[in-house]
Image: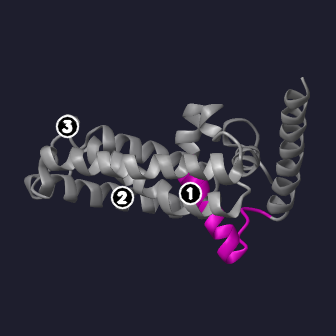
Amino acid sequence: MGRTGLFDLERYFAIYGAYHSNPVNVLLHTFLVWPLVFAVAVLLHFTPSLYNFPSGLNNHGFKLNVGLVLTLMYAIFYVKLDKKAGSLAALLLFLTWVGASVLASGLGFGRSWKLVLAVQVFCWPALLIGHGVFEKRLPGIADSFVEGLLMGPYFVLLEFLQSAFSYEPYPGFNKSVKEKIEVDIKAWKAIKNQKKLS
């Protein structure tokens, strides 16, 4: 049932889970990753338009720009990973783009960048504290920046669905991921202990 290669959800989620096993760190990510996505969407609202929508939509700040293109690319990728959770993630991304477009259009660039900066200044240090103080492990984004940016929003949602509703994309997914996470954490601890001894 699982996929391999680019759409190997099990592998991605196991890597994510190995960096997010502490409950406090998980909680911080649950509440702070999506505000970061929203803040970036606000900033991307000000990228040049690639196509002008009919005037009614333009009046509300909707533009076919980098923000919308990235939203669509992320949404398609998430749906390809898993139709159910991916569709929910795609919907949330689209709503984020709509909300960010309306807000950015109303605030203008001068106030929007201050909002974006405030969100970044609050969220990133809190996430780093989650990793440094509670997880005691560097964030996965340090190992793979692109993968971290691409997968973070989706995995926060998938982890929430898993915890709240015992959701799994296919039977045996959660068990297989848990086993992979345990192997990864054991290997990481062994390397950490070896470094302490040398």
What is the three-letter code of the residue carrying label 1? His
The spot of residue 31 in percent (x, y) is 50, 63
- Cβ atoms at labels 2 and 1 below 8 Å apart: no
Q: CA distance from mark 3 to mark 1?
A: 32 Å
Nearer the observer, disc 3 or disc 1?
Answer: 1
Residue carrying label 1: 29
Quadrant in the rendering for residue 57: bottom left
Tell me what residue is drawn at x 85 percent, y 48 percent: 180
- The amino acid type, in three-letter code, at marker 3 is Ser
- Residue 155 percent location from the top left of the image: 61, 54
Residue matched to label 3: 49
Label disc, if present, on residue 85 of the rendered structure: none
Which residue was labeled with disc 2?
A: 96
Q: Earlier in the sequence, mark 2 or mark 1?
A: 1
Towards the viewer: 136 or 105: 136
Residue found farthest to the bottom: 165
Which residue is nearer to you in this view: 131 or 88?
131
Q: Residues within 10 Å of mark 2 (few under 14, many from 20)?
A: many
Please report whichever mark, 2 or 3, sits nearer to the chain's N-terminal start. Answer: 3
